[in-house]
Image (cartoon, grey):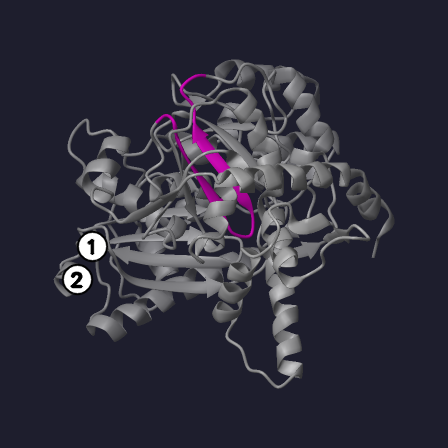
Amino acid sequence: MSIEQIQNGKAILGIEFGSTRIKSVLINSDHQVIASGSHEWENDYVDGVWTYSSEAIISGLQSSYADLKKDVFERYHVKIGKLAGMGVSAMMHGYLPFDSGMNLLVPFRTWRNTITGQAAEELTRLFSFNMPQRWSLSHLYQAILNNEPHVKDIAFLTTLAGWIHYLLTGEKVLGVGDASGMMPIDSDTCTYDAAMVSAFDKLIAGKNYPWKLIDILPRVLVAGLNAGTLTEKGALLLDPEGDLAAGCPLCPPEGDAGTGMTATNSVRARTGNVSAGTSIFSMIVLEKPMSKVYPEIDIVTTPAGKQVGMVHCNSCTSDINAWVSLFREFAALMGLQTEAGDVFTKLFRKSLEGSPDCGGLVNFNYLAGEPVTGLSEGRPMFLRLPDAAMNLANFMRAQIYASMETLKYGMEIMNRENVAIDCVYGHGGLFKTEGVGQNYLAAAIHAPVTVMETAGEGGAWGIALLADYLVYRKPDEQLDDYLQNHVFAGMKQMTVSPDAEDEKGFNRYMERFVSCIPAQKAAADCFKN
């Protein structure tokens, strides 16, 4: 069936730009991944800014798609000539300003940067709405505060997904979920909050820029709306070999948060998900607004425009990866050859033997600043009490706790706000080892955590599902019903509830973690290149 669907142009393509990988997947009418491709990449730290070059973005897109083409040919001995639909997703937030000729005015400033503190603080006061540092409007206003000369030339401001979508379709649009990471969205109208747009224009009126905010932002679309078609130029950009035909429809480009919600069937109120990879964030679909503004909690939306409480943390698995690399280097020194996946699995399982509070060990995995805990810079740091039980099990448990400790710090606010959560879905590499990351997360957030058999598919599959929703949904069929009835019905899943001893232990660990935040700040202040 997969061969016929590829040959007949019935397959759906999803592409997502993650922090370390650009992944492309092809799905069939049963929503199964029938081929995939990827391209590994890393951000650069240039002149104090985390960035990816324009060249790396375009070449990465082409490399990922070429790898997909190769997989299709090796599996089915056919080439992709036509698609039924496609979608593009990417890391949310950041700063991509263009002039009237769609030339990028400054290098891409990614979500990872914590260089917009003054702007975020002033906008939060102006809007009475939490404006995180990584949001596009915070970046724009900080550039204005810095008197950066390029600001007067801005004709279009978008996200990474929005830019790639423009290159493929010529359309300056954005999915509502991704747009909600640029500036606040009114969930009633599913577009930018008009009062806040007006307030921002008044705030900068004295600068006499030749643009108004609404004129430079992408048009906002909800899931299910047509966001344009693949142009001849776009098809050739994606597939320089010229095999791919133009003309297929594209769904609204979305951020990784929205595709994560879609890929975990958590777009309905009282559901949520935790995405754990290079960064970690939770998304809880709210029944009602929060009682007040919390700087630790972002308010974004689902791809359908429903309000979501989000706790976003910049660091998650990178520090674990570094330690595992060190252990593998030691093993090689001792003459032992190891496979990375096997080492991860064994070390994660070993952590289950550790004390619930990690035995007096505390780890900070902060490769970058963490606004949730009020830190503009980070330094990976491991601490232990003099009488701590320093063993491998406790060490690894502290490493895994560290991957979600800042998330727990923010989620405790939702717990105190009595935010209703029926289920939370976990996805990402942290949950690959059964019964470890999932169990610890349940203890951290005081809620059941479910991992589905598709947990490893990630955002590329999520954006493919949104493209599938565009192409194949029935009239007036809502996104949450479509996912439940057509995609996830009968899907294998495993749920764990919080273990009382793990909850107590994690809480004790958090007391030590919070007490050490001043030490982390001092390390960032004193330990410089």
How many discs mark residues in the rendered view? 2
Residue lying farthest bottom?
335
The image shows residue 26, relative to residue 95, as above or below, that is: below
Kind of residue at disc 1:
Asn
Q: Nearer the viewer, residue 229 or 178?
A: 178
The residue that appears at 58% across and 20% down in the rendered structure is: 129
What residue is pinned by disc 2? 2
Instruction: Tell me residue 490's x, y (percent).
Output: 20, 45
Does the segment drawn in magenta span residue 195? no
> Regarding mark 1 in the picture, which secondary structure is present there?
loop
Q: Is residue 511 left or right of residue 400?
A: right
Instruction: Tell me residue 363's x, y (percent).
Output: 69, 50
Kind of residue at disc 2:
Ser
Tell me how far mark 1 sits from mark 2, CA to CA.
Answer: 6 Å
The image shows residue 326, relative to residue 282, as above or below, that is: below
Residue segment shown in magenta = 269-288
Residue 374's quadrant in the figure?
Answer: top right
- Main secondary structure along the magenta-highlighted residues: strand
Instruction: Tell me residue 24's x, y (percent).
Output: 36, 58
User: Do the residues bearing badges 1 and 2 touch, measured as CB atoms within 8 Å?
Assistant: yes
Instruction: Tell me residue 453's x, y (percent).
Output: 32, 53
Q: Is residue 272 left or right of residue 121?
A: left
> Regarding mark 2 in the picture, which secondary structure is present there?
helix
Q: Is residue 346 visible?
A: yes
Q: Nearer the viewer, residue 146 or 36?
A: 36
Q: Quadrant of the C terminus?
A: bottom right
What residue is pinned by disc 1? 28
The residue that appears at 45% across and 36% down in the rendered structure is: 178
